Image (cartoon, rainbow, N blue to C red):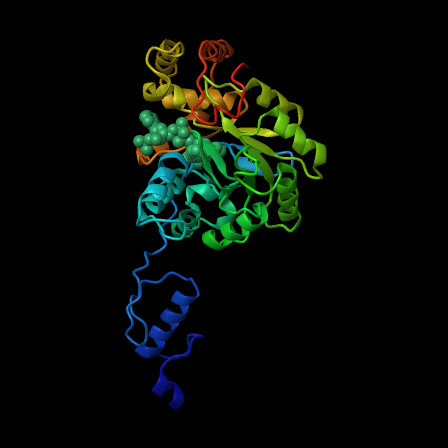
Amino acid sequence: MEGDKKYGARADGCGVQSSAEKQMWRCIRYISGDIVTTTTTMTGEVLPKVPKVPKVPKVPKVPKVTLLSSDTIPGVGFGTGTKHRVKKQTDPKLGMETIDEDLVTVLVSALHSGFRHLDTAECYLTRVEIGEAIRRSGIPRSEVWITDKYDQGWKWKGVLLPSCTPSGPYESLHKSLRLMKVDYIDLFLIHGPYFCKETCNITVEEAWKQMERLLEEGLVRNIGVSNFDVPLLKRIFKICKHQPQVDQVEYHLYQQEHRVVEFCRQHKMLVEAYAPLTPMFSSKVGANRPAEPVIEELSEKYHVQPNQLLLRWVYQSGVLPITTSSNPERMKNTFKIFEFELEPDDFARLKNAGQQFKYRGYFDNAFDLDI
Ligand SMILES: NC(=O)C1=CN([C@@H]2O[C@H](COP(=O)(O)OP(=O)(O)OC[C@H]3O[C@@H](n4cnc5c(N)ncnc54)[C@H](OP(=O)(O)O)[C@@H]3O)[C@@H](O)[C@H]2O)C=CC1
Ligand SMILES: O=C1Nc2ccccc2C1=O
């Protein structure tokens, strides 16, 4: 038809497309979030360069752990707190809404190494990178488990820091969905135990009711806590309609958290371990600590590196490790932990050696060290 010749092909593929029409369709695809390589609009406006969606590499199979809710969570998590949090909080060019490109690169690398479980929190300021990295990785959102945390404010080394969302978890989660550009979170935790007038205006019971509302509205798939000792867990159990699925705590050879682990086992809650590699760092725990020779001997016996031995010990004790690294080789070598098993005697030797020394890197004023 005459008209078709003049204006080129239609979007349904009939005839020949004019360059203006091609550019219009690229432009529409760009605006709708579809990733294309064009850098200019029809009017010549320069768009930011957007990388093509990469091919998702084949990755090792990671076992999943079943929660009381019946949801299954990948057996090792990749954290965006600690070193990543410090960078985001201290670089004046970065902030809650500003993307740290280096962290997005780290996260895409972690996803392409095989991690399908990412850990963030309101106060890490890394929510924005989590959402961006998942989109750039080419991995469907539904295949990645996101854990996020409500910031109830902190008492940290004698300094009082107020909550980022004084009205509670409900507001925090809505902020999170906007920053990540996702429509649900897999697991939402109350980050810490500091419910007091100086840090936030709500009680832990009020916060839990807001968590339950988020669950009932389908905006979060699971709810839980972090850094909660038994007395605080009992307060939740006293008032809850939906019980916590998870308690994320510091857990490693030198901090075995017997009381919390026992309570969680009784209530079918999963314990997650942050800072699982702590015994490797003499800068933290000091030199010549009792587990050192055992870690060395058993790393040789199992032909693994100390980080793999420590992560395996955590996993084999029924606790899900959350680790992190900026180094792609270290990311990849994490998955070796699912390829070997510590013999019961070796597991016990590590456990017993660890119990000869106590070290807590976080929140020593919130826990009783006399375990
Ligand atoms: N709920 C809470 O209150 C808390 C939660 N968390 C969460 O847990 C996550 C993990 O905690 P984190 O203490 O960082 O965990 P880890 O114990 O896994 O320590 C990670 C550190 O170890 C280094 N590392 C990793 N592999 C090796 C190796 N093979 N040899 C030497 N060094 C290595 C990494 O540096 P490199 O990049 O050089 O490899 C990184 O700095 C956090 O990111 C956060 O998401 C953490 C603290 C508190
Ligand atoms: O990753 C973390 N680093 C921290 C330091 C202080 C309080 C909480 C955290 C984290 O969750």
In the rendered image, residue 132, in percent from the top left (x then y), is placed at: 40, 51
Indicate left or right for 33 with 223 as reference: left
Residue 205, located in which quarter of the rendered image?
top right
Q: In the image, what residue occupies the spot 44% across and 50% down?
A: 131
Indicate left or right for 58 with 268 as reference: left
Q: Nearer the viewer, residue 4 or 229?
A: 229
Can residue 268 be seen from the camera position used here?
no
Q: In the image, what residue occupies the spot 57% across and 34% down?
A: 225
Can residue 84 be seen from the camera position used here?
yes
Residue 357, located in which quarter of the rendered image?
top left
In the rendered image, residue 209, in percent from the top left (x then y), is placed at: 66, 43
Q: Nearer the viewer, residue 28 or 103?
A: 103
Q: Quadrant of the N terminus?
A: bottom left
Indicate left or right for 285 with 193 as reference: left
Compared with 214, 47 (above or below) is: below
Q: In the image, what residue occupies the spot 42% across and 52% down?
A: 135
Quadrant of the displayed image that contains ligand 2: top left
Q: Nearer the viewer, residue 164 or 12?
A: 164
Q: Quadrant of the C terminus?
A: top right
Q: Nearer the viewer, residue 146 or 193?
A: 193
Indicate left or right for 28 with 236 as reference: left
In the rendered image, residue 61, in percent from the top left (x then y), is placed at: 46, 34
Q: How many marks?
A: 0
Compared with 314, 55 (above or below) is: below
In the rendered image, residue 283, in percent from the top left (x then y), is placed at: 32, 21
